[in-house]
Amino acid sequence: MNQPVTAAASPYPNYLPWSITLTVLGACFCCLIGAAPGIVALVFGNQVNSKYAAGDEDGARRASETTKIWCWVGTGLVALGLIWTILSFFINGMSMMSDEFLQELQKAQSR
């Protein structure tokens, strides 16, 4: 019978969950700049198992290392984007809240 051939799992990590998470978070916090390293990491992460299955162990190791580097770059950009989002929320949000608070205070005093 024809049974599917299953390749042995690569001993090198492919970092796919990390790169998928980075791509989504990068798109949320940093637009295209933050999502780009995650996409590059996805491409190299997908190459790890296929290169190992093809017998290119050195290529699989290099793809795994490249994926890890791009994941760290993306993590740094997402962290900066998150910090920027939080700071802009507090700076802009507090200024808007203080104006509203002053208006409500003036209304309360005029009653």
Image (cartoon, rainbow, N blue to C red):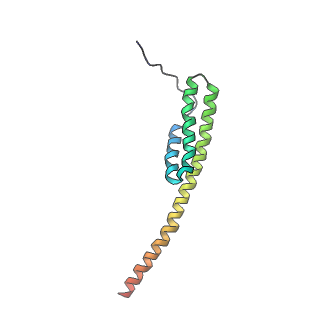
77 is higher (above) or lower (below) than 8: below
Q: Residue at x 53, y 64 (%)?
A: 88
Q: Residue at x 40, y 12 (%)?
A: 1
Query: Residue 12 placed where, x, y %?
Result: 58, 31
Query: Residue 18 placed where, x, y %?
Result: 52, 41
Single out the residue that lies furthest toward the front: 32
Query: Residue 110 placed where, x, y %?
Result: 38, 87
Please indicate, yes or no, whether residue 10 appears anywhere in the rendered image.
no
25 is higher (above) or lower (below) than 55: below
Q: Is residue 78 left or right of residue 109?
A: right
Q: Residue at x 54, y 33 (%)?
A: 46
Please indicate, yes or no, whether residue 26 appears anywhere in the rendered image.
yes
Q: Please tell me in which quadrant of the rendered image residue 3 appears.
A: top left
Query: Residue 81 placed where, x, y %?
Result: 55, 55
34 is higher (above) or lower (below) than 6: below
Q: Residue at x 60, y 42 (%)?
A: 70
Q: Count the marks.
A: 0
Q: Quadrant of the C terminus?
A: bottom left
Single out the residue that lies furthest toward the top: 1
Single out the residue that lies furthest toward the left: 111
Q: Please tell me in which quadrant of the rendered image residue 52 appears.
A: top right
Single out the residue that lies furthest toward the bottom: 110
